[in-house]
Image (cartoon, rainbow, N blue to C red):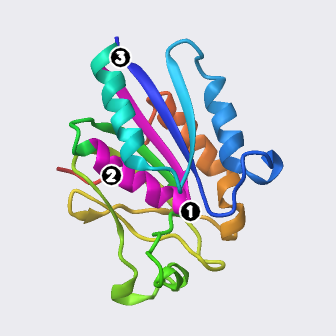
Amino acid sequence: MSRTIHIVASGFLQRVDRVNDNGMVRLAWELERLDCTRNAVREHSYKDDYNQIANRLLAEKQERGPIRVRLYGYSYGGWWCMKLAWALSHRGIVVDSVVLSDPVRRYPHPFKWLALLPAEGGLLRIPLTFPDTTLVVKHFYQRQNLPCGFDVRLRGCEVPGTELRLTHQHMDNSDAFHIACLDAAQGRFDLKGKCEL
């Protein structure tokens, strides 16, 4: 029987010790309540080394048997989930599902300001592109303020997102986002709008 690993990635300026301000910590707690024996919930920052995490998951798979990976990310954490999905793909590990809230691409210094481009930013707003070893991606975005969620691509096509009428700073606490995460965690992922092979 395979184990399910749930990885929750927080965004810029989020701190794990400020629980009331961090919807991703609350999400991790909600996921932990689902099934403590078979499921593992791990919290990460967008600054964590996704290659090290991928190596750990590969070692875990080799040592303990099959694993299923599900990713949840907010803001820069959405970009980090994309980078982790690619790192896992290079190691032969499939990502079952990804749920993102207002995912923002992290550009290298001195181009970090590009993350603040409006949705109409043209060619400089590079979509978050997931590898073919990612089965399903669902994302939520907002257009109320900056930064605003980037487009998401899977298998060569754009993944339609769901627009929410919230500011970026409140997207991690969105009920719609949390419900989608809990549905994905329990294998009840809404496949409407997914990119067909």
Measured as percent of width and height from the top left, residue 103 is found at 50, 63
Residue on which disc 1 sits:
75
Residue 25 in view here: yes
Going by the numbered disc 3, the residue's amino acid type is Ser
Determine the residue positioned at 45% across, 71% down.
150
Q: Nearer the viewer, residue 70 or 9?
A: 9
Q: Earlier in the sequence, mark 1 or mark 2?
A: 1
Q: Which residues are magenta?
A: 65-88
Counting from the top left corner in percent of width and height, residue 47 is at 53, 56
**Sequence-first disc among 2 and 3:** 3
Q: Report how far apart the C-alphas of labels 1 and 2 lie in the structure.
A: 21 Å
Q: Residues within 10 Å of mark 1 (few under 14, many from 20)?
A: many
- Determine which residue is flagged by label 2: 194
Badge number at residue 186? none
| Secondary structure state at the residue bearing disc 2 | loop
The residue mark sitting in front, 1 or 2, is 1
Residue 33 as seen in the image, left or right of residue 148: right
Residue bearing the label numbered 3: 2
Give the residue type that dot 1 points to: Ser
Seen in the image, is 123 located left or right of residue 32?
left
